[in-house]
Image (spheres, rainbow, N blue to C red):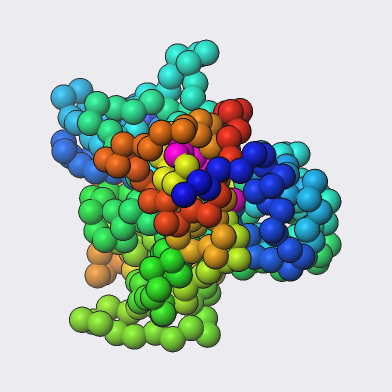
Amino acid sequence: MDKRLPDLAAAVAPITDGASVMIGGFGSSGIPFGLIAALLDHGARELTIISNNAGAGETGIATLLREGRVAKVICSYPRSPGSIWFERRYEAGEIALEVVPQGTLAERIRAAGAGLGGFLTPTGYGTLLAEGKETRMIDGRGYVLEAPLPADFALLRAERADPWGNLSYHATARNFNPVMAMAARHAVAEVRAVQDTPLDPETVVTPGIFVQAVTQYEVRP
Amino acid sequence: MTGWSDSELAARVALDIPDGSYVNLGIGKPTHVSAHVPEGREVIYHSENGILGVGPTPPEGQEDPELIDASKRFVTPAPGASYFEHADSFAMMRGGHIDIAVLGAYQVACNGDLANWATLDEKFPPAVGGAMDLVAGVPTILVMMRHTDRDGSPKLLERCTYPLTGLGVVTRVYTDLAVLDITPQGFRLRDLAPGIDLDHLRSVTGASITT
């Protein structure tokens, strides 16, 4: 088995207009900047972007928003310092926004990857973000039923990979990447070092079964 | 009238963090608490982006752009640190494994309701981050904030007017003027800042205070 692709363009080639795309990262850490730039060149439009943040400055997800490629953002924290392109599109009513508590976002993504129909969480119970959702009392405590969140594609950032698609990460660049790999129908990773030999099975964080393609991209932000 | 400076307030919060605690510090003022923890106490800091054991800022030139905390500041791993993915990180928070969270707030009500994620201004897109998960799972929630808004209106209230982050979740509030516990009888005074008297404190608080 060999999941290595020659370049970033080949990795994003299957992404179609209207696709839902998970993008790993938190702040500036663990974001697949190379794959995002390739997606911008590729030209897919009307995308639903699922990520923790909504981009900052003129990099990453902000470039997709700037070029009008995004129809909807699902995230926990869109309003970071410098998230001007998100704010501009949001204020103009050009994009839809779904705000999800960060832990609920991670768990909804994990649930989709794990084949679950949802889960009950105390997070958000009694707040605006639970309005219209089913609730249940368990041992005197209120819980909210949250649905799984799958996606068509995931763009990931990893430190090392092997031809089988096994991934390991660097420091806090791990964040959402492992759960997004699980939840997407087609997950592709830009990897600082793709090696010809197998990773030590003890060091594998994301098993290759969750990853459809890897491509080398040495640049670390 | 004097009250506590930001750094004195951080030191006051730090006094209440016991040795051996697992602690999450929210963005803004709470990040300053770690610098004031008394000598001899080992406190392990959790940052929701996937590190347990957040250490000091690295020396200039040795920053690793992929090693940051939830405030997006460059950090180092403390001895005994670990890295993990987001679902595990929030299991630590929601699952009751973190002992204490220190958070900022827009408003706190006398029943412990917390509002710290959205205002009533619809121009600003809401941004919740990990706040709702923290208050859902962490047993001790310490709030650190100015006693009043910029326009002087009270932030400690009978009922919050902003959208809630969690219901009845706050343990204690630290402001520039006082430290107050949340009790079944509402706000109870624990400490007054130097130069502040109780009459003044009551005049800038939107709910009653017991002593």
What x and y, as percent, mark residue B22?
Answer: 24, 43
The residue that appears at 39% across and 84% down in the rendered structure is: A135
Vertical placement of A9 versus B189: above or below? above
Q: Which residues are magenta?
A: A155-162
The residue that appears at 29% across and 54% down in the rendered structure is: B92
The residue that appears at 69% across and 58% down in the rendered structure is: A14
The residue that appears at 42% across and 23% down in the rendered structure is: B57
Where the C terminus of chain A falls, by quadrant? Answer: top right
> Number of numbered discs present?
0
Vertical placement of A152 versus B37: above or below? below
Q: Is residue A57 left or right of residue A185?
A: right
Q: Is residue A63 left or right of residue A1?
A: right
Instruction: Please check the rendered image and state whether residue A14 is part of the magenta-colored stretch, yes or no.
Output: no
Vertical placement of B27 versus B152: above or below? above
Vertical placement of B62 versus A192: above or below? above
What x and y, as percent, mark residue B75?
Answer: 42, 28
Q: Is residue A130 visible?
A: yes
Give the camera-side residue of A23 and B130.
Answer: A23
